[in-house]
Amino acid sequence: DTEVTQTPKHLVMGMTNKKSLKCEQHMGHRAMYWYKQKAKKPPELMFVYSYEKLSINESVPSRFSPECPNSSLLNLHLHALQPEDSALYLCASSQEFEGYNEQFFGPGTRLTVL
Amino acid sequence: DQQVKQNSPSLSVQEGRISILNCDYTNSMFDYFLWYKKYPAEGPTFLISISSIKDKNEDGRFTVFLNKSAKHLSLHIVPSQPGDSAVYFCAAKRGGTSYGKLTFGQGTILTVHP
């Protein structure tokens, strides 16, 4: 299994809602990532988990809250988002955070904040 | 400070011909380079990588060349096919250290005409 899966595929939420994005991989990878991608821009790193511990938070606003329940799962909890947070949210994983490891991306969740 | 640059926003090529996508970097600490392909509304797909101990890596129709002295890499696609039409991102990291963050270029839109 060489796949990173993400649910839901699309999400529309109001600014007062609470929702969660889910990501799963079964490749035995020990590093997992959340990225945000706006149209015609490269992916922007948000968070990195390495061995289920948060290693990097790229100064992301607290309305985004990551969680790594186990080595295969990664969640992103959303609360009180703004319309400018509308974007494609990508999950990725790699064998390790360090070293010569490629990151494999999921299909993304298209988020629209009204 | 854009450490990875793809100076051509777009490239148009005839089917069967060679596509050459270019990427420049400024950080001499980068020693691992990757190319990703992205279709609209999908996650990036890993294509090919190269470490700084090599100057060429080949995988089927895809070849990546690295010129360390010029801090330049290129992706060659031969022969180009209409299905190759996508956005191509160059990415770089310091693979040999504990800092595993990927830095992406802005992307090049490749269009292959039948």
Image (cartoon, coloured by chain):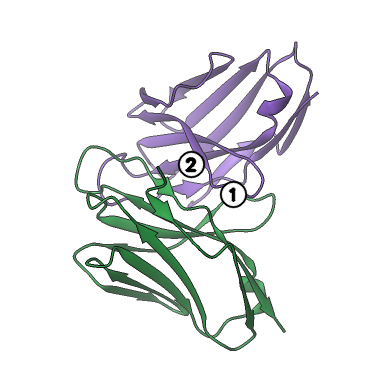
- Residue B103 is situated, as x and y percent measured from the top left of the image, at 40, 46
Crowding at dot 2, Cα within 10 Å, few <14 / some 14-19 / many 20+, comes out as many
Among the chains pictured, the one given green colouring is: B
- Quadrant in which residue A11 is drawn: top right
Indicate left or right for A50 with A8 as reference.
Answer: left
Callout 2 secondary element: strand
Q: Colour of chain A?
A: purple
Q: Residue at x 56, y 45 (%)?
A: A106
Q: Residue at x 46, y 49 (%)?
A: A104
Callout 1 secondary element: loop
Q: Give the residue at mark 2.
A: A92
Q: Is residue B100 above or below residue A54?
A: below
- Residue A100 is situated, as x and y percent measured from the top left of the image, at 27, 52
Q: Residue furthest bottom?
A: B16
Identify the subunit bearing mark 2.
A
Q: Is residue A26 above or below residue A62?
A: below
Indicate left or right for B15 with B6 as reference.
Answer: right
Q: Residue at x 23, y 53 (%)?
A: B28
Q: CA distance from mark 2 to mark 1?
A: 9 Å
Give whichever of A9, B56 is nearer the camera. Answer: B56
Q: Give the residue at mark 1.
A: B43
Indicate left or right for A58 with A9 as reference.
Answer: left
